[in-house]
């Protein structure tokens, strides 16, 4: 192949484009069929294992296990059951979970992190199982927004700074 020009390679393809696309579609369909029986917990473990930072992995693990427990209480145990929900229903489940966490005393920052963890997890599922998960929920969470204001502190005058320096 090293001595062939691009035109010669294109004119003599090993497989036609339709054959390659058919093989790819068949493989993706097989992967998505197998994912139907995976539990939500198994997929969380798989997602967490690909996170390098131990602190991030632990935080996401806690967030997603709480979300998994919430789904389990609502009789959603497998990826097939989760994927069978409408986009609207997935968004509502996520919204209700976050509102419950807030009512249980989680801070706004914690709930915002949980929201981010759920979105990242579903994005991961969409990447791995693109036929099952075709949508990443748009979780409304205006009440979970953190408003930050930059505080203004007066600076020290030269006299104050020198006095402070002398005291050290």
Image: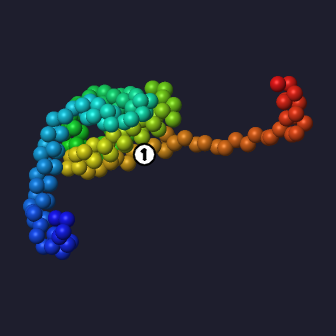
Residue that appears at 61% across and 42% down: 148
Q: Position of residue 70 (x, y in %)?
A: 32, 30
Q: Nearer the viewer, residue 25 or 151?
A: 25
Q: Quadrant of residue 9?
A: bottom left
Label 1: how many residues lie within 10 Å, few (<14), some (14-19) or many (20+)?
some
Q: Which residue is mark 1?
A: 140
Q: Quadrant of the C terminus?
A: top right
Q: Is residue 103 in view from this perspective?
A: no
Q: Is residue 35 left or right of residue 62?
A: left
Vertical comparison of 64 with 124: above or below: above
Q: Position of residue 90 (x, y in %)?
A: 30, 42
Q: Indicate the quadrant containing the N terminus: top left, top right, bottom left or bottom right.
A: bottom left
Residue for point 17% across, 70% down:
4
The quadrant in which residue 63 appears is top left
**Residue 153 seen by the camera:** yes
Mark 1 lies on a secondary structure that is loop
């Amino acid at each position: 192949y090293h001595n062939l020009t691009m035109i010669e390679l294109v004119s003599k393809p090993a497989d036609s484009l339709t054959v390659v696309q058919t093989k790819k579609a068949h493989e993706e369909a097989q992967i998505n069929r197998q994912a139907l029986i995976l539990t939500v917990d198994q997929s969380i473990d798989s997602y967490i294992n690909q996170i390098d930072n131990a602190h991030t992995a632990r935080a996401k693990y806690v967030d997603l296990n709480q979300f998994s427990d919430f789904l389990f209480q609502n009789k959603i145990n497998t990826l097939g059951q989760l994927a069978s929900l409408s986009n609207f229903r997935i968004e509502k489940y996520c919204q209700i979970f976050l509102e419950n966490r807030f009512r249980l005393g989680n801070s706004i920052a914690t709930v915002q992190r949980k929201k981010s963890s759920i979105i990242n997890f579903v994005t991961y599922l969409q990447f791995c199982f693109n036929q099952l998960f075709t949508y990443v929920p748009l979780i409304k969470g205006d009440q979970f927004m953190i408003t930050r204001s930059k505080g203004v502190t007066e600076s020290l005058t030269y006299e104050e700074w020198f006095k402070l320096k002398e005291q050290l």
